Image (cartoon, helix red, strand yellow):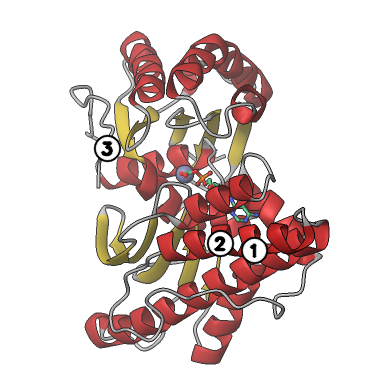
Amino acid sequence: PQRPYVLGIETSCDETAAAIVSADKRVLAHRVLSQIDDHAEFGGVVPEIAARQHISHLDKLLESLMKDAGLGFDDMDAVAATTGPGLVGGLMVGVMTAKAISAATGKPFIAVNHLAGHALTVRLVDDISFPYLLLLVSGGHCQILSVTGVGAFTRLGTTIDDAAGEAFDKTAKLLGLGYPGGPAVEAAAREGDPKRFRLPKPMVGKPGCNFSFSGLKTAVRRLAEECAEGEGILTIRDRNDICAAFQQALGDCLIDRLKNAIQLFRETAGNGNFPLVVAGGVAANAHLRGRIEALADKEGLRFSAPPLALCTDNGAMIAWAGLERFREDPAINDADEAPRPRWP
Ligand code: KG4
Ligand code: ZN
């Protein structure tokens, strides 16, 4: 593998994750420990439990990671950690661990923005150069970004209420599908009829690239209540059909907003042909991925997205974003950076 080697640590939410990547786009080792079981009974992530689980598991996870790679901390050229945005207790665990490794080895610490991690992952797995148009859809965010460089993002649109993943998670909770909701709603939708119910599509047809999903969530609640009233119980068929309608409506919103963004990007980037990229946990959804790819085809744009395991939170995306920053500025040293719950 080609140097630099960068270790990346991700602890901003409910995944304890780390990876080592090299400049020639190899993932030398990669570990993700999900805390889903620890949070499932609460129907969502409990910050205090998340922080304690990160503390309990991160040291051992790093030990096995280094063993997998056959490397020691001294072999790293830099150490990166998600420094925000996210749950501050978890961020502190990852940042302090990375800073300790940095202090012990004398290798620089790099503070990585979690969203920049999602945004740049596609360059780890595909030959994508700047500029590109990015739809970033995760549990905490729903944004359309123009990505013109490693640290150069222009936000073209964002959600005015819920994130796309949040809408999936809330819908799942309403329908009794458990946590995390995305994969469960997708599986139910696959068995359902998207045409039986019609749900609202907030913002569709309006100018601009902003999103809104709270009305969709409210409509799902009402629909579920109506179905349950008629039949005494929400049947599996009803539930599947509601999931299919929800996924269809959310997809319509994403596509409509993306169409406006493509037009805007064409005007501002002055470049007719650019890649269209989708990233973040919701990008793991096959239905949505397929529709965005079809839109790219229609618009004559190249489509790219990370493989599923690199869409949801992981260490490789943080290591890679750190490596990109390190390559641009080998003298980088973020030792003074503190965890930031908010970091737009
Ligand atoms: O990027 P991510 O792992 O964490 C954040 O940065 O938020 O995204 C997690 C979100 C959750 O809301 C989860 O329900 C959603 O991504 N998600 C999905 C799928 N897999 C994960 N949403 C829809 N379909 C999926 N297959
Ligand atoms: Zn994420």
From the viewer's perspective, tell me whether residue 39 is left or right of residue 237: left
User: Is any part of residue 274 visible from this angle?
Assistant: no
**Image quadrant containing the N terminus:** top right
Which quadrant of the view contains residue 266?
Answer: bottom left
The local secondary structure at tag 2 comes to helix
- List x then y, in percent, for residue 68: 68, 23
Q: What residue type is labelled 3?
A: Pro
Looking at the rendered image, the disc whose residue lies closer to the viewer, 2 or 3, is 2
**Residue under the image location 62 percent in, 32 percent down:** 29
* Disc 3: which residue: 330
Q: From this view, report whether residue 60 is shown above or below residue 312.
A: above
Mark 3 crowdedness (10 Å alpha carbons): few <14, some 14-19, many ≥20 = some
Q: What residue type is labelled 1?
A: Glu
The local secondary structure at tag 3 comes to loop
- List x then y, in percent, for residue 333: 22, 29
Which quadrant of the view contains residue 88?
Answer: top left
* Disc 2: which residue: 222
Report if the CB atoms under discs 1 and 2 are less than 8 Å apart.
Answer: yes
Report if the CB atoms under discs 2 and 3 are less than 8 Å apart.
Answer: no
Whichever of labels 2 and 3 marks the residue nearer the N terminus, that label is 2
**Foreground: 341 or 203?**
203
Q: Does the residue labelled 3 lie within 8 Å of ligand 2?
A: no
**Residue under the image location 61 percent in, 41 percent down:** 180
- List x then y, in percent, for residue 94: 41, 21
- Compute the Cα span from label 2 to label 3: 55 Å
Q: Which mark is residue 226?
A: 1
Q: From this view, report whether residue 277 is shown above or below residue 4.
A: below
**Foreground: 156 or 161?**
161
- Compute the Cα span from label 1 to label 2: 6 Å
Whichever of labels 1 and 3 marks the residue nearer the N terminus, that label is 1
